[in-house]
Amino acid sequence: MAKSFKSLLGDDIKNTRTLLHEAIPITGSIVSGTYSDDNIKTFSHGMYESVYDYPYLSSSANHIFDLSYGCSTRVSSSTNTQNAKKMNMYNQMAQVLFGYDLSGSIRKFDSDGSLDDDGAGTMDHCFFINFSRLLCKDEIKKNTFRLGLETAGTVASPGTLLTLGDYDAGNEFRTSPAGDYGLIFKTSGDASDNTNSVGLLFYQAGVAVLTSSIFTGEFGPTTDPRPSAATAQTGTTIQQLADGFRNRFHDLDLNNTIELNSAIYFCRVNHNEFNYSSNPTYLSGSKLVIKNQSTDLPVTYITTIGLYSPDNELMAVAKLSEPIRKDPNTELTLRVRLDY
Amino acid sequence: MAFLDNSGDIILDAVLTDTGRLRMAQGDGSFKISKFALGDDEINYGLYNKDHLSGSAYYDLEVLQTPVLEAFTNNTSNLKTKLVTMSRTNVLYMPVLKVNPRAISGETSSKYFIRTEAAGATKTEDASAVTMPAPGKFYVAVDSTTFEGIYKYREDGTSDSIYHSDNDQVIPHGIIQGYTASPAEGGMIRVDHGLDTTEISVGQGLDTDLMENAFIVELDYRLGRIKLQSGTNIAPVNFIDDDNIATYYLAGSNWVDNGPSLTNTTLSAEQLALLGTNDPQVFGDGQGTGPRGNSFKFRIQASQELQQSSYLFQQLGTSQDLTSGGFGAGSVAGLPEADSAKDGYLWNLKDRKLWYLDSTVRVIGANTGYRIDIPIRFVKLT
């Protein structure tokens, strides 16, 4: 009996998992400068602002991250500008990323990652960088986050560039309700002591939390006179703080991670299989055009592999980049990988 | 789709089809891959030069240079021609499928839509005045009004007032009753299977491993269903894909006609004589072609949407006003010029509108994978 399908047996299907990484570089001129802030989307609620890689009204623009600021209840004051919104933002991020303490209260961000609620290392004033999924995909790869910030001097004359990073996170990281997180340090040398941490990086959530105390120089709104960060965080809005952060942003590099789950189908073609074709050009007057006489070996050329359901529904297709000759003297194993 | 880069290593470009994604999204376990098939859609075996002067290494030089397209995600656009497994290597002839247009006494005809002048007719202008649509199509009348209008306009000389009263016969073929009607009239579609060659005698028969005992049929489910050649039974659908293409797997004596002596048995003189005079198959003696296989017969039932509404005709089809342009040459329905004096029924069709919608029904041999696309046209008079 002739047949067109061959069943896949248990040994012919193999599932694998692969991690892919992409390098993501972001220059500071995109975040402030190149597009005259046409790539910065602000909102009337003023809770955060969004940064795009191109003027956001263009369909070519991609959302890359959001910037926001929040302060804890410990440092809140009714005289602070947008005091409630800053607290709300802090609490929202803290409850999602850090969870609750034993009493059910929202836990505060702890820069040393100890979760001991003792007040040591607690970050009361925080900047939040929420990366889009387009950028960080399934997660940020550990020990690849490097953020260049101009934390000292003035905008016009910045001091030494500070390169923050999750140094040593490849060896040491922690878990939170929002997945793994690592500590952010100013230098790789600081990583030996957790108390030197200036922020937290949540890998799966794609959020960096930085203490505002790293900024020692000029900060705030983009026009002079610019206050210090300590002054700006109480006297300006979240949007102005985000603008200030963008103007001290030098560059960012990270690697993302894509988790690929694959099913590999080994399509084994034995010597006595698939040697004839139903292609109309295979016949001329019902006679095989590739044969002169019946003793000639049949030959076919494979260009396509179809994967079918039990009902013969075509579920997936694989194409070869060039035809492969098949005749009774050859056997093949075609390895088709489907990624999910 | 672009061509795949074939300048380096052989690569595989694999994608889920739209149906595959649909089944996966359904999450009901219907996404399951259990078998594979190989295709050679791009290959033109006519390029295989088995007489190449430089030797056998050059026979398939041009075939191997064929560029291959990227995979289509539309499931019905891939693997249109599959490779076939047969354990023996000495097959020199393989069967094909053909629509059988031959009339056989006692059976509905399977001609493409045409009006033919009956023997003994005295009037010829009706047939000659009509230019039939080409290439041939089977017409599916979606309701009795349409069927009466097209099929029953036949000058058959009966006293029925709706018929032409002349003693001239212009007989329509290829109009299928696409609705439930009793008794069944009109045409059906018959696909025959066999060797289309004169190099093998019909008496040699067709090898059993080449025989088709089941057929796979694909038809747009929005437009129609497959039903038996007679009776009103609708075939059960195997599955309907994301593009509303329904697939049927049809086997058994209701669908597949075995006919006489279909295997490697030498036919008797009586059988040959019978086949020679009244062969129901498009292949075989009397047709100047080789051994015959089975026949597959079916009709098409129009969907309820087509029967009850002209919406899909408006969306997907075309219309022809049955004014002067709708008759005579160019008439989609093949209607001759009406004569108010004697063509009372035909005259009554004037100023009506004929909607028509073209599609195809695909028939595939389940065994050898050979396929043909049969053009069909749904028609509706409003």
Image (cartoon, coloured by chain):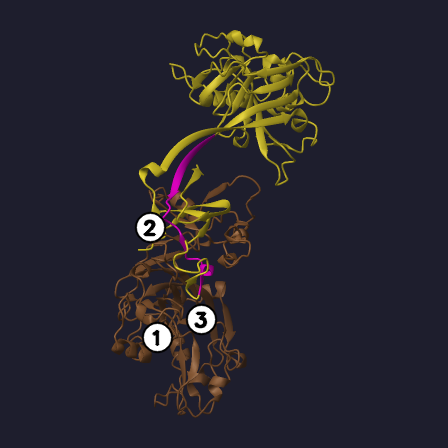
**Residue at coordinates 46% horizontally, 60% vertically from top-left?**
A289
Q: Nearer the viewer, mark 1 or mark 2?
A: 1
Q: Amino acid at mark 2?
A: Asp
Quick check: do tags 3 and 2 share a chain? no
Task: Tell which subunit mark 2 falls on.
Answer: A
Which corner quadrant of the image does residue B222 belong to? bottom left
In x, y percent, where is residue B124? 47, 89
Q: Amino acid at mark 1?
A: Asp
Evaluate whether residue A282 shows in this view.
Answer: yes
In x, y percent, where is residue B338? 48, 86
Dot 1 lies on which element?
A: loop
Which corner quadrant of the image does residue A117 belong to? top left
Identify the colour of chain B in the image: brown
The yellow chain is A
**Relative to the observer, which residue lies in front, B319 or A109?**
B319
Q: Amino acid at mark 3?
A: Lys
Query: Residue A230, relative to residue B81: is it above or below?
Result: above
Residue at image mark 2: A311
Image: magenta residue range: A259-284
Residue at image mark 1: B285
Disc with the residue nearer the chain's start (3 vs 1): 3
